[in-house]
Image (spheres, grey):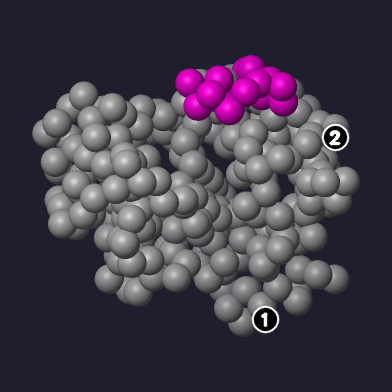
Amino acid sequence: MLKFHTDMAKHDLLKIKKLTAHIENKQILKDVSLQIAKGETVVIFGPNGSGKTSLLKAILGIGGIKIKSGKILFKNKTLNNLTISKRAELGISLMFQKPPKINGIKLSSLLNRLNSNSKYIEDVTERLSCSKFINRDLNSNLSGGETKRSELLQLACQKSSLFLFDEPDSGVDIDNIKLIGREIKKLMSDKEKSSIIITHNGNILDYIDANTAYVLIDGKIIHKNSPLKIWEIIKKDGYEKYKH
């Protein structure tokens, strides 16, 4: 049984306390509790359909998720009833696993709206090899790896303090994972920023420095340990060890 502090410590950026949530009357999260300190990177493991993406959506308030009980606290503010825009204004950003295509909006135009530092945009664009599609419509005619890099470029240009990464290492080749992993590591070198990284296959762990990991199964957090220790068990035994 996991134990959590009852009060939010001053250094905690995010605290989720006994969160139960539903989608269309179906329970997807049950009594989920976790906390993230400023400057910390947390990894969440879990099999497909375990509620990982739903947890990120609950934090940002998207996807029709209804909180039935519990609290989400960010910068000591309760998020439960805040709009998506208010949560974003507080400093929360999400890298979608499968982002939508948006015609009529150029990636370059969006980046300029997100960040006024043109040199910074140029540097991140170059590091993520996004130059060849910077003037295309958002996520239009991109490969899987290009889409992931485009999403990360957008996140890097936002002045957020909590970044939510939904399986940044899924569906991409090793070269793209290297680019993505190294940029996430660089982004998270700012100790004023924190992140949650969801991963199913664990490949991203070769490139990032993560502090803590949780295992989420059937909407419940059932284990907490160091990311590498959990990943070694998953590689050896799958998630069966955590289901009993």
Q: Which residue is mark 2?
A: 68
Depth check, front residue: 133 or 226: 133
Contact, CB < 8 Å: mark 2 with mark 1? Answer: no
Q: Please state if 192 lies on the left or on the right of 70 as rendered.
A: left
Magenta segment: does it hold 152? no
Q: Residue at x 71, y 40 (%)?
A: 64
Magenta segment: does it hold 84? yes
Q: Residue at x 69, y 29 (%)?
A: 72
Q: Earlier in the sequence, mark 2 or mark 1?
A: 2
> Where is residue 107, by image quadrant?
top left
- In the rendered image, the residue lying farthest to the front is 104
Q: Position of residue 20 (x, y in %)?
A: 82, 40
141 shown above or below 243: above
Q: Please state if 31 lies on the left or on the right of 183 as rendered.
A: right
Q: Position of residue 61 (x, y in %)?
A: 64, 34
Looking at the picture, which amino acid does disc 2 mark?
A: Lys
- SS assignment at label 2: strand
Depth check, front residue: 54 or 136: 136
Q: Which residue is mark 1?
A: 237
Q: Position of residue 58 (x, y in %)?
A: 67, 39
Check disc 1: other Cα within 10 Å, few if <14, some if 14-19, many if 20+: few
Number of marks in the image? 2
Mark 2 vs mark 1: give the one in front: 2
Res. 207 in view = yes
Looking at the picture, which amino acid does disc 1 mark?
A: Asp
Question: Which region shows up in magenta?
Answer: 76-89
